[in-house]
Image (cartoon, helix red, strand yellow):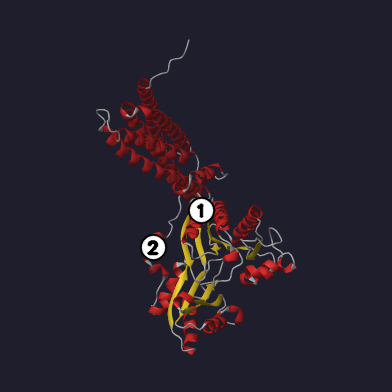
């Protein structure tokens, strides 16, 4: 699944109703998950994190931007953090099955649409920057709202990448970019001397000779009577949290100032916290694999049945031989079993259930077991076919070994659809009970289930027979062929019986003469 994180920064950190309205615009966008809302009254700034596939993420960012432009007026905004826009910065971060190039394209598409829709000038930064001079956000934002108000439209260096060549009167300008995961990390100092924080930030930041992947500024926290070294760690693997903290502490000691606390703004990767724990606890031979949550939530290898319907259908439609008819047959059988379980549950759940429906409990129990087995057969059929393919690719200079491997793989390839056939016939046996006792309002679902199960039967039959045709063991071929014939005949009879039961219970509308 493609997954992109978006972490827009809004120039509002004090009015809760405004922050919630912006967050609600993201929450209400289908296909995205709101992860975090972090606000700082002194900075007068909020950082909101959300994830989703690229399209929905772009839609959510646009919805949040619209709300922010309605509710934030930079002419009345005061805060410690530098800002140039109501939506100050919108970065897109690749997380899963998405490249940095994809996020650059997403940033540029968002920036263009944002500028056209809201008439706000947009500057592309970091990986999305169109010139080297605009990679650094601090350079893009230099002068802030008030300074850029006089420069955009006059200074060629301040020509926006998208939008009007004038600043928006209330929403300012916005930086849009693509970047790797960033950690916003602040360390608070037990002093009100802002110069101390600024001097430490100067020693710490990369551009002045400090840590290679750290940006830092000194801020005053007036309400708390202290100052803060505010940092962005742009590569937490090379400039780790504990290094940033220890350097701040080292420089603060030289000024005779204590460190009174630190904070992560927004979200941080687990690895960054594990690094800190390993350093401070002096753990020996420690591995990230020892973290319980990593073991619990590490994604397992994806199989066909883990895929969405859209992706599964794309796999079937591709030029690859698998998944093929055998897997599709098993999947149709699973859907048939699921439909019968649904009708049985609906019937059992009615306040005035019809008499003699106790047997439907067994339908639910057996139907669920068949559904799960058929789903396993979806995967097993593909695996079996792949084994046959591998057998045929064995070297021809060992004919006996190659022939034996092909024979064994083909037998296995016939056994899987035979299991699908058997399970699908068992589904049809359940259909009679449901057709007879199921709710009349759901009888169309029974018809669909029967049709799907019969299709599964015919697909499985053809897959068994095509494999039997390639086997030399005629005794085995005759045995399985007879079994297939008997199951196929029973399936046809079960379909007919279920059809008659449904027909007898459905009121036929009168056709006017």
Q: 441 or 44: nearer the eye?
A: 44
Q: Is residue 262 above or below residue 308?
A: below
Q: Is residue 486 above or below residue 93?
A: above
Reading the image, the residue beneath label 2 is 295
Circle nearer the N terminus (1, 2)? 1
Q: Residue at x 51, y 72 (%)?
A: 237
Residue 262 makes an appearance in the image: yes
Q: Are marks 1 and 2 in contact (CB under 8 Å)?
A: no
Label 1: how many Cα within 10 Å (few below 14, some 14–19, many 20+):
some
Q: Position of residue 456 (x, y in %)?
A: 43, 34
Q: Residue at x 57, y 79 (%)?
A: 205
Q: Quadrant of residue 156?
A: bottom right
Name the disc covering residue 502, or none. Answer: none
Reading the image, the residue beneath label 1 is 25
Q: Label 2's element?
A: helix
Q: 131 or 190: nearer the eye?
A: 190
Label 2: how many Cα within 10 Å (few below 14, some 14–19, many 20+):
few
Instruction: Say which of marks 1 and 2 sits in front.
Output: 1
Mark 1 vs mark 2, CA separation in Å = 34 Å
Q: Position of residue 404 (x, y in %)?
A: 45, 47
Q: Is 101 on the left or on the right of 436, as rendered?
A: right
Q: Residue at x 50, y 61 (%)?
A: 49
Q: Residue furthest front?
A: 76
Q: 300 or 502: nearer the eye?
A: 502
Q: Is 330 on the left or on the right of 22, as rendered?
A: left
Q: Quadrant of residue 138?
A: bottom right
Q: Label 1's element?
A: helix
């Amino acid at each position: 699944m493609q997954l992109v994180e978006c972490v827009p920064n809004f120039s509002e950190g004090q009015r809760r109703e405004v922050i919630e309205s912006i967050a609600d615009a993201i929450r209400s966008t289908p296909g995205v998950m709101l992860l975090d809302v972090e606000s700082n009254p002194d900075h007068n700034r909020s950082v909101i994190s959300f994830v989703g596939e690229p399209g929905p993420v772009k839609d959510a960012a646009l919805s949040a931007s619209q709300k922010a432009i309605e509710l934030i007026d930079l002419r009345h905004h005061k805060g410690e953090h530098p800002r140039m826009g109501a939506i100050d910065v919108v970065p897109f971060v690749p997380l899963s099955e998405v490249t940095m190039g994809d996020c650059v394209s997403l940033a540029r598409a968002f920036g263009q649409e944002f500028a056209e829709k809201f008439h706000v000038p947009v500057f592309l930064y970091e990986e999305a920057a169109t010139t080297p001079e605009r990679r650094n956000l601090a350079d893009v934002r230099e002068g802030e709202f008030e300074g850029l108000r006089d420069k955009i439209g006059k200074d060629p260096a301040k020509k926006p990448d998208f939008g009007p060549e004038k600043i928006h009167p209330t929403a300012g300008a916005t930086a849009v970019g693509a970047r790797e995961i960033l950690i916003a990390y602040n360390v608070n100092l037990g002093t009100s001397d802002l110069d101390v924080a600024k001097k430490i930030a100067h020693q710490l930041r990369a551009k002045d000779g400090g840590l290679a992947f750290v940006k830092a500024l000194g801020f005053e926290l007036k309400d708390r009577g202290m100052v803060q070294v505010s940092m962005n760690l742009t590569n937490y693997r090379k400039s780790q949290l504990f290094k940033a903290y220890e350097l701040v502490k080292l420089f603060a000691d030289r000024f005779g100032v204590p460190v009174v606390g630190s904070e992560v703004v927004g979200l941080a990767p687990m690895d960054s916290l594990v690094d800190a724990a390993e350093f401070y606890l002096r753990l020996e031979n420690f591995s990230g694999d020892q973290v319980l949550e990593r073991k619990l939530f590490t994604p397992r290898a994806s199989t066909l049945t883990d895929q969405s319907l859209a992706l599964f259908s794309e796999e079937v439609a591709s030029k690859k031989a698998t998944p093929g008819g055998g897997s599709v047959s098993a999947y149709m059988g699973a859907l048939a079993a699921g439909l019968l379980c649904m009708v049985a549950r609906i019937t059992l759940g009615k306040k005035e259930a019809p008499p003699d429906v106790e047997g439907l409990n067994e339908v639910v129990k057996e139907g669920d077991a068949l559904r799960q087995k058929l789903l396993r057969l979806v995967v097993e059929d593909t695996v079996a076919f792949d084994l046959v393919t591998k057998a045929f690719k064995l070297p021809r200079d060992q004919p006996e070994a190659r022939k034996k491997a092909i024979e064994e793989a083909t037998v296995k390839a016939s056994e899987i659809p035979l299991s699908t056939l058997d399970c699908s016939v068992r589904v049809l046996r359940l259909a009679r009970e449901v057709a007879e006792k199921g709710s009349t309002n759901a009888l169309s679902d029974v018809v669909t289930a029967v049709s799907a199960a019969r299709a599964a039967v015919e697909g499985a039959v053809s897959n068994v027979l095509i494999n039997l045709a390639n086997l030399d063991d005629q005794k085995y071929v005759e045995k399985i062929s007879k079994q297939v014939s008997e199951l196929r005949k029973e399936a046809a009879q079960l379909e007919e019986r279920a059809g008659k039961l449904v027909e007898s219970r459905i009121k036929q509308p009168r056709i006017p003469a």
